[in-house]
C-alpha cells in the first residue's frame, strides 16, 4: 500500500518530556517536510530534507529536531525546549511544489 | 515576508448555490497556486492547482488566478453538504522549493 504513513495518530506528552513522531514513505521521494498546524492558522514549516543525511530548518524549527538516515524515514522529535507543542503535525512529500500529506499526528501536552 | 491571506469565515452557503473562496498573496514572484480541502481532524488534500492567469475548471470546481491583482479564488458550483470543510490556499515558489499556506476559510453548506 503506497503512501505516507504517520504514527501515532494521537500522542500525549508530559511536561519536560521528549517525544518522537514517525513519518515513513514508500513513494521513493527525495524531499520530505514537517509542518505544524494550530487552530485557525495555516501550516508552518518546521524542518525539511531534500536528500538523505541532510536537512534544513524551516520557519519554526526551535524546540524540534529531525534526522534523515534513510530515504523512507523522516522522524521529528519534539523536545522539552518546545514550550507550546500542542498542535497537529503533518508530514509531507512534495512533487513539483504539490504537497501530499500523511494522516497527521495530534500531539497534546498533559 | 511572503504572506497568503484568507478570510477565516465561516462562510455559510445554501446547498446547490455557488461558494466563492478568495485568497490574496504578497509576493509577485509566486509561481504556483493551490487549493486544499481539509475536513475536521484530517490532513489537507489537494483539489485544484493553477499556474497561469485565467480560469481552470475541474468538475464542480473552478480556480481563478489574477497575477496582476495577486488574487486567486476557488468557486464551487452546486454546493453539497460534503463540501463543508476548511479550504486552504497555498502559494509555491520553485526557486526555494517552498510552499506558503494561508490560514484557511471554513465553509459550511446548509441544507
Image (cartoon, coloured by chain):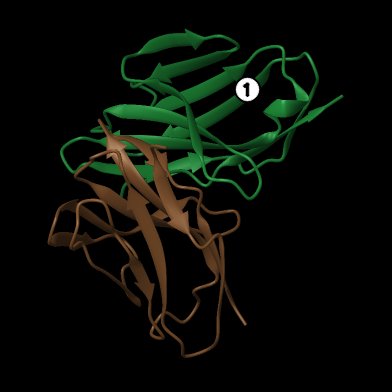
Chain colours: A brown, B green
Residue at the spot x=32%, y=64% of the render? Answer: A75
Q: Nearer the viewer, residue B103 or B66?
A: B103
Taking A81 as reference, is B104 above or below it? above
Would you name the residue on which mark 1 appears?
B20
For residue B13, above or below residue A110: above
Measuring from the top left, give residue A102's x and y in whole percent: 45, 47
Dividing the picture into quadrants, the one containing residue B67 is: top left
Q: Residue at x 31, y 15 (%)?
A: B52
B52 is higher (above) or lower (below) than A18: above
Is B32 on the left-hand or right-hand side of B7?
left
Q: Residue at x 38, y 85 (%)?
A: A81
Task: Give the quarter of the image for residue A73.
Answer: bottom left
From the viewer's side, name the closer residue of A93 and A26: A26
- Give the farthest residue toward the front: A1
* Image position, residue A99 (x, y; %): 36, 38
Tell me if B27 is positioned left or right of B16 in this view.
left
Other residues around mark 1 within 10 Å, as few (<14) / some (14–19) / many (≥20): some
Q: Picture coordinates of residue A37 (x, y %)?
A: 50, 57
Q: Is residue B75 left or right of residue B96?
A: right
Q: Where residue B89 sits in the image (x, y, percent)?
A: 47, 35
Identify the secondary structure beneath mark 1.
strand
Q: The N terminus of chain A appears in which quarter of the rendering?
A: top left
User: B48 or A20, which lies in front?
Assistant: A20
Amino acid at each position: 500500500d503506497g503512501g505516507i504513513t504517520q504514527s501515532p495518530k494521537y500522542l500525549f506528552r508530559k511536561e519536560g518530556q521528549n517525544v518522537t513522531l514517525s513519518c515513513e514513505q514508500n513513494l521513493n521521494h527525495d524531499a520530505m517536510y514537517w509542518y505544524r498546524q494550530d487552530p485557525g492558522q495555516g501550516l508552518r514549516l518546521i524542518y525539511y530534507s531534500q536528500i538523505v543525511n541532510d536537512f534544513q530548518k524551516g520557519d519554526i524549527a526551535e524546540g524540534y529536531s529531525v534526522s534523515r538516515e534513510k530515504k523512507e524515514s523522516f522522524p521529528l522529535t519534539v523536545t522539552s525546549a518546545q514550550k507550546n507543542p500542542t498542535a497537529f503535525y503533518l508530514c509531507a512529500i512534495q512533487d513539483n511544489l504539490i504537497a501530499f500529506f500523511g494522516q497527521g499526528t495530534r500531539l497534546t501536552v498533559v | 515576508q511572503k504572506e497568503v491571506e484568507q478570510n477565516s469565515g465561516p462562510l455559510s452557503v445554501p446547498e446547490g448555490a455557488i461558494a466563492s473562496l478568495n485568497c490574496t498573496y504578497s509576493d509577485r514572484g509566486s509561481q504556483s497556486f493551490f487549493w486544499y480541502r481539509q475536513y475536521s481532524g484530517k490532513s489537507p488534500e489537494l483539489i485544484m492547482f493553477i499556474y497561469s492567469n485565467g480560469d481552470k475548471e475541474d468538475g464542480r470546481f473552478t480556480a481563478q488566478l489574477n497575477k496582476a491583482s495577486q488574487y486567486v479564488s476557488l468557486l464551487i458550483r452546486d454546493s453539497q453538504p460534503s463540501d463543508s470543510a476548511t479550504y486552504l490556499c497555498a502559494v509555491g515558489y520553485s526557486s526555494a522549493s517552498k510552499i506558503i499556506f494561508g490560514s484557511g476559510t471554513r465553509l459550511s453548506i446548509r441544507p
